[in-house]
Amino acid sequence: MNVEGPPIDNLRSIELCLGVLKTVLPAGSAIYIATPITSGLRFAEWFDTKGRYLMSNAEMYVAARKANVDKINITESEEYAAALRRSLKKPVINPGLLEAENWGQPDYRFFWRNVIEYFCEALYLKDGWEYSSGASYEYLIASLKGIPRIDQAGQRVPPEDAADAIANALRLLRQKNADTSFLEQVRGEIVLLSGHSAAVQ
């Protein structure tokens, strides 16, 4: 997997959002939380029991996912961000609060990649991050930039530990019929950083 290039359709709006952030945050001054939003274990469990039966109706599927997955994940991400702000006394960027009209996943990934690369002092990993395609991708971007990656217990997470955690997550996600293709690609890139075997049993 190559780190994705800029999306074409929404590049202007992405640049505007980045510009707004630059008016309030100096480079390398913020904490970024990597947290499940639309994917992760909660999504996989919902998809396995309910979501896959709604896929014929896109509108119903999205509404149900937002109510049963996104909303809960975002609430938990807000609680985690608030706790970090209290303890670290630093600005904390919570990606769960951004919902941009007409953006797809490539737009969000490109935007948050740029945010992490420019603004991020450290990346904090909310419990369950390894089940999330987006959070794992954010781990990869921080790793490539040499930005510290710290779990919810306050411990640094080296690439070899991240690769193992994602491998364990992939086994469970497959059992729940979740699409793991992007997460597998991300893990492959992390494996290259760690020197691990790429195989997932």
Image (cartoon, helix red, strand yellow):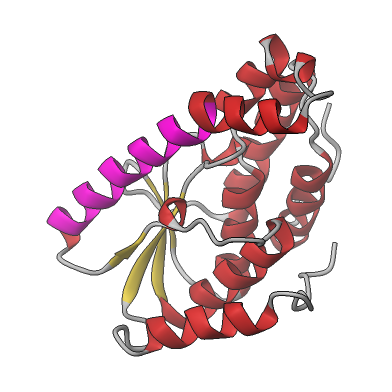
Whether residue 83 can be seen here: yes
Which stretch is magenta?
Answer: 69-87
Residue at left 26%, top 41%? 79
Residue at left 34%, top 37%? 75
Give the image quarter of residue 105: bottom right
Q: Main secondary structure of the magenta part?
A: helix
Magenta highlight on residue 53: no
Depth order, front residue of 168/91: 91
Can you give x and y, in whole percent of width and height, for residue 132 in the image? 61, 41
| Image: 134 above or below 43 | below
Can you give x and y, in whole percent of width and height, for residue 198 in the image? 84, 45
| Image: 159 above or below 13 | above
Q: Is residue 43 left or right of residue 69?
A: right
| Image: 34 above or below 32 | above
Q: Which part of the image, by quadrant, shows the N terminus?
A: bottom right
Residue at left 59%, top 61%? 101
Q: Is residue 143 left or right of residue 177?
A: left
Q: Is residue 162 left or right of residue 57?
A: left
Give the image quarter of residue 10: bottom right
Can you give x and y, in whole percent of width and height, for residue 183 in the image? 74, 44
Whether residue 160 can be seen here: no
Q: Which part of the image, by quadrant, shows the C terminus?
A: top right
Magenta highlight on residue 74: yes
Outermost residue, top direction? Answer: 49
Q: Is residue 88 left or right of residue 29?
A: left
Can you give x and y, in whole percent of width and height, for residue 113 in the image? 60, 70
